[in-house]
Image (spheres, rainbow, N blue to C red):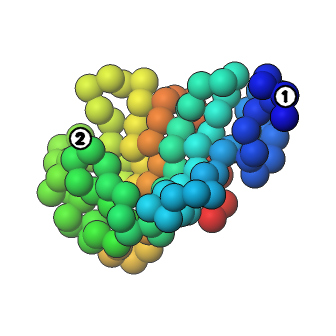
Amino acid sequence: MDDDAPPPSSGLINKGCYYVELQVNAQLERVRFMVIIDAIATIEVSRNYTLATVNGAQAGQSIDQVKAIYGKNLVTKDNTLIYTPPKKKFRIIFETDRDQITGYRAGRLPEVDGSKWMF
C-alpha cells in the first residue's frame, strides 16, 4: 500500500475529504471521522453507548441529562442540541429522538454543521 494513500474509508466526498471508520476496536463501533486534507474535521458517534464527550454526555442519555451537563451553552434547534464551547469555531451537535440522545458529532465549523448523519 502506498504511504501517501488515504486510509480505508467509507468513500471520498470530494477531493481531500473522506470518512474513516475504524474496524478493530469494538468501543469505536459506529464512530467515524471526517478527514479533510489529512486533518480530522469532525468525529461522529451514532448509537454508541460507551463513548462519551469529555464532559460525560453520550448516546442513550436523556435530553435533560445533557442539558444539565452543558447548561446555558446549549441551544435547542429542531431535533438537535447544539453546544458552543469557549473556542467558538467548534461545536458539539447532539441528535435526539423524542427525549433521548441518539448520537452526536463534534468538530470545527463549518464541517460539523454540514455533516450528514448517515449511520
**How many marks on residues?**
2
Mark 1 nearby-residue class (10 Å; few <14, some 14–19, many ≥20): few
Q: Residues within 10 Å of mark 2 (few under 14, many from 20)?
A: few
Q: Position of residue 47 (x, y in %)?
A: 47, 69
Q: Nearer the viewer, residue 10 or 67?
A: 10
For this view, does 36 lie left or right of residue 81?
right
**Figure quadrant of residue 66:** bottom left
- Residue that extends furthest to the bottom in the rendered view of this protein: 98
Type of the residue with mark 1 = Asp
Q: Is residue 48 above or below residue 21?
A: below
Residue at 75% across, 45% down: 8
Left or right of residue 111: residue 1:
right
Tell me the tag on residue 2. Answer: 1
Q: CA distance from mark 2 to mark 1?
A: 44 Å
Q: Amino acid at mark 2?
A: Asn
Q: Which mark is residue 73?
A: 2
The first of marks 2 and 1 along the sequence is 1
Residue 23 appears left or right of 62: right
Q: Residue at x 41, y 30 (%)?
A: 90
The secondary element bearing badge 1 is classed as loop
Q: Position of residue 86 (x, y in %)?
A: 26, 26
- Residue mark closest to the camera, 2 vs 1: 1
* x and y percentages locating residue 55 in the rendered image: 22, 47
Residue at the front extreme of this rendering: 1
